[in-house]
Image: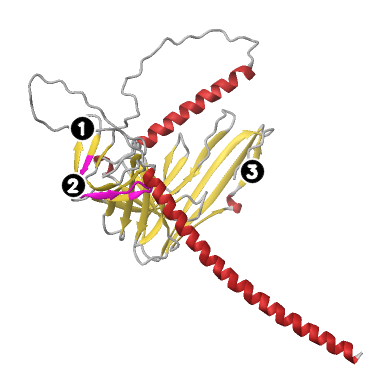
Amino acid sequence: NSASVSELKLFAEYFRSRLLEIKKDQVRYSDELAVQNDKLERIHKQLDAMNAKMNVPTSQVTVYLSVTENTVGNIQLSYIVSDAGWQPVYDIRVADIRNPVTMNFNATVFQNTGEEWNNIQLRLSTVNVRQQGRQPELKPWFIDFESPLYDIRNQAPQSVALKSASDRLMAEEEALEESATAAIYTEMQENQTSVEYNISMPYTIPSDNNQHTINIQQYSIPANFEYYCVPKLSRDVFLLARLTQWQQYNFLPGEINLFFEGTYVGKSYLNVRNTADTLDLSLGRDENIIVTRNKQVDLTEQRTIAANKRETHTWEITVRNNKRLPVFIGLYDQIPVSMNKDLVVEPVDYSEGMYEKESGKITWKLELSPATELRKTLSFTIRYPKDKIVYID
């Protein structure tokens, strides 16, 4: 027994030593394999770069000239490529609510033409070369009685295909209609149907299909700052920068990056088709302004008078300014609008707010001093037949 125990100990010691040697070999081979894989990856990258240079597309242009006499001149070649374009991107920065808004109008330029654009002068145009220039024409609009044996199975695929094709073309055109500009090195030329931005500062745009940002123009735009809250939907209070003179600039549709007090607060979108005189930009939430909206149970009642029910609903809205500065806040709520003549809605109290009867919208424009609180009441009645059911949130 003692001999077998000693033999087992020897075997165990042997296995431990062999296992340690195997682990060391595994680590060494793993390190060597990593080094060889790095070398292989570098070689593959070099081969890809060499193949890319060998596969660069080449073109040949043949020019035929017709002249009446011997002359000397220069020929300038212009051509259109599909793998190049640009989009407008805006950076809007607000240092504080006492200063104007700074808007940087940028262009993100990309190209994948196979040629490197080294130290070139860019000219960015809003012209959409893929968009047809021919005006639309009206064709006869035929109508007829609908057949009672209309087979929708034979018609639906075609209509869906036509709609998807139309949507795709519209999306392409809208994407190609986007453009941009550059600060002291940019000259804007407004043509009859387009705008061009000539950038005198040379840029290098490699053929990598990546976005390269060019700062084009910078504006200082006056803004009115106002807080905004719809307590029925959210108790959060948002700070808005309201730009009242934005339409005098040749802005293009594009994404907006918003910065407030040196901090990135989110994205927005500039829709130049917006016909409103004021462009509202949200600068984020302000937790130092507290808004509550509570239903007043003791002022909410329900009565049955003859064949009708009459209900009164009342809410109290409280706004408190915990900031050290006075603030202006737009507070918005609503009274329901009836869509049935048997359902009558009558406003009772909206605390001197502005009431739009057609939409039911209630607006309060408030100015709050520091550490002050205001209360507003919203109350209305509804009258409807007692055999009907009406839900009020």
Amino acid type shown at disc 1: Asn
136, above or below 270, in the image: above
Residue that mark 2 sits on: 200
- What residue is at 66 percent from the left and 75 percent from the top? 23
In this picture the colour scheme is: secondary structure
Whichever of callouts 3 and 2 sits on the residue coming sooner in the sequence is 2
Residue 191: image tag: 1
353 displayed left or right of 389: left
Q: Which residues are the magenta region? A: 197-212
287, above or below 142, in the image: below
Amino acid type shown at disc 3: Gln
What is the secondary structure assignment of the residue under circle 2? loop
Amino acid type shown at disc 2: Ser
Q: Report crowding for label 2: few under 14, some 14 to 19, many 20 or more residues within 10 A (C-alpha).
A: some
370, above or below 382, in the image: below
Residue that mark 3 sits on: 302
The part of the image, by quadrant, that contains residue 153 is: top right
